[in-house]
Image: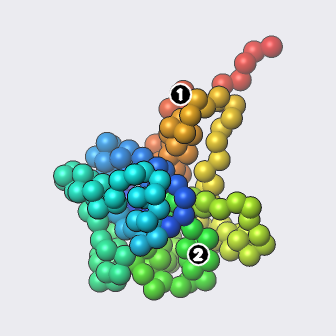
Amino acid sequence: MTILQRPIIVGISGASGAALARRTVDELLRREIPTIAVCSNGGKLVWQDELGVSFNDTLAEWREHPQFTAYPINDLRAPIASGTFVTSGMVVVPCSMNSVASIAHGLSNNLLLRAADVCLKENRRLVLVPRETPLHSIHLENMLTLSRIGATILPPEPAFYLHPQGIDDIVRFVVGRVLVAMGVADELPIDLQYVAKAD
């Protein structure tokens, strides 16, 4: 089994940024990469508020793809709760500060948190896309703790130098960075790269 045949876990927590999660799953499936999703109850509420569609409706669409699997948030018997189930890693997008704090302190009382904990203990990729502003010292300390133990902290910051024309441009850029961080892509598409202009 090659690295890209191993599944990637997408955790979706209750922070703002449902469009980022949707694009991430869509892009992984477009590349025929096995994708496993787990969404918190808060994530489902935000999904409805921000995208105007229920998470379950989106889940039904994704389930039509043969490379897609999803598990309920409280299913601690799911394969991704065990380190013996081999994956290419996990991205939590968006990642709430509650999830950041729990992962940083080894608290894993639901499947999303447990899967992230497994990635850390097995030295697999863990990319967190934290969505909160402003950040206070506890938020920053928790993210520093995670960075020190190998997680990638990838805030969804727009690349203003690319002159985004709308939210979709920003989402595409951030998800592009997520795919690079997860090892799915070697680099951003050329239209999302900074090109220095000659003097």
Viewport quadrant of the C terminus: top right
Query: In this orientation, which residue lies closer to the viewer: 49 or 22?
Result: 49
Tell me: 23 left or right of 60. right
Residue at 46 percent across and 43 percent down: it is 185
Relative to 121, residue 177 above or below: above
Please identify the quarter of the rendering in which residue 16 is found: bottom right
Q: Is mark 2 on a helix, strand or loop?
A: helix
The amino acid on which the numbered mark 2 sits, given as a three-letter code, is Asn
Tell me: 75 left or right of 10. left
Tell me: 150 left or right of 31. right
Evaluate whether residue 34 shows in this view: no
Please identify the quarter of the rendering in which residue 72 is found: bottom left
Residue at 42 percent across and 47 percent down: it is 23
Relative to 15, residue 100 above or below: below
Q: Mark 2 — residue?
A: 98
Tell me: 68 left or right of 74. left
Other residues around mark 2 within 10 Å, as few (<14) / some (14–19) / many (≥20):
few
The amino acid on which the numbered mark 1 sits, given as a three-letter code, is Ile
Distance from the alpha carbon under mark 1 to that under mark 2: 35 Å
Relative to 83, residue 19 above or below: above
Other residues around mark 1 within 10 Å, as few (<14) / some (14–19) / many (≥20):
few
Residue 79 x, y percent position in the rendering: 29, 76
Query: In this orientation, which residue lies closer to the viewer: 7 or 19?
Result: 19
Viewport quadrant of the N terminus: bottom left
Q: What element carries label 1?
A: helix
Q: Mark 1 — residue?
A: 190
